[in-house]
Amino acid sequence: MERIAVFPGSFDPITRGHESIILRAVPLFDKIIVAIGENGEKRSFFDIDQRLGWLNQLFGRESRIEIARYSGLTVDFARKNKASFILRGLRTSADFEFERGIGQMNKLIYPGIETVFLLCVPEYASVSSSIVRDIYRHGGDVAQFLPEGIKI
């Protein structure tokens, strides 16, 4: 059976932390679907087409990484794409508590899914999309927090 993982997120914007989790996970799975979740109740800072473009720019040449967008429950998207894993990155213990609850609910909804956590590397532990957006919104230079070649 093919080991397929979904790595969901808003990637608003994608950070070096996201990139690190994805690249470190590639050897663990046959395929990783990096999926932007569309939430009608949540307003994104960057346009979804721009975010998809960044993901394709970074990972479009990697045969084991697929880029997608979806709406609705992540677990339903995973099931539809025959994924047995949901990949999540953890920066803090607060991230773990939040993700643990979601992972347990997903397991109740779809018993065939496992949530896999990867710890972020220490140098990216304080980097989050929301902090990057705030720095950018106030005219700060965010290049050091973005993957190489990504311009916003």
Image (spheres, grey):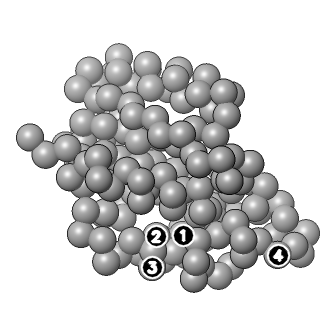
The residue at 57%/82% (across/down) is 149
Q: Position of residue 99 (x, y in %)?
A: 54, 29
- The residue type indicated by label 4 comes to Asp
Q: Which mark is residue 55?
A: 2
Between disc 2 and disc 4, whose residue precedes? 2
Q: Quadrant of the N terminus?
A: top left
Front in this rendered view, residue 85 or 82: 85
Residue that label 3 marks: 57
The residue at 36%/61% (across/down) is 68
Cβ atoms under marks 3 and 1 closer than 8 Å: no
Say whether residue 135 is left or right of residue 117: right
- The residue type indicated by label 2 comes to Leu
Residue that label 4 marks: 141
Cβ atoms under marks 3 and 2 closer than 8 Å: yes
Foreground tag (2 vs 4)? 4
Q: Callout 4: helix, strand or loop?
A: loop
- The residue type indicated by label 1 comes to Arg
Residue that label 1 marks: 51
- The residue type indicated by label 3 comes to Gln
Callout 2: few (<14), some (14-19), or many (20+) C-alpha neighbours within 10 Å? many
Say whether residue 73 is left or right of residue 3: right
Foreground tag (1 vs 4)? 4
Report, in whole angstroms, how far the alpha carbon at label 3 lies from the one at label 1: 10 Å
Callout 4: few (<14), some (14-19), or many (20+) C-alpha neighbours within 10 Å? few
Cβ atoms under marks 2 and 4 closer than 8 Å: no
Q: Callout 3: helix, strand or loop?
A: helix
Q: Callout 1: helix, strand or loop?
A: helix
Report, in whole angstroms, how far the alpha carbon at label 4 lies from the one at label 3: 21 Å
Report, in whole angstroms, how far the alpha carbon at label 2 lies from the one at label 4: 21 Å
Q: Callout 2: helix, strand or loop?
A: helix
Cβ atoms under marks 2 and 1 closer than 8 Å: yes
Between disc 4 and disc 3, whose residue precedes? 3
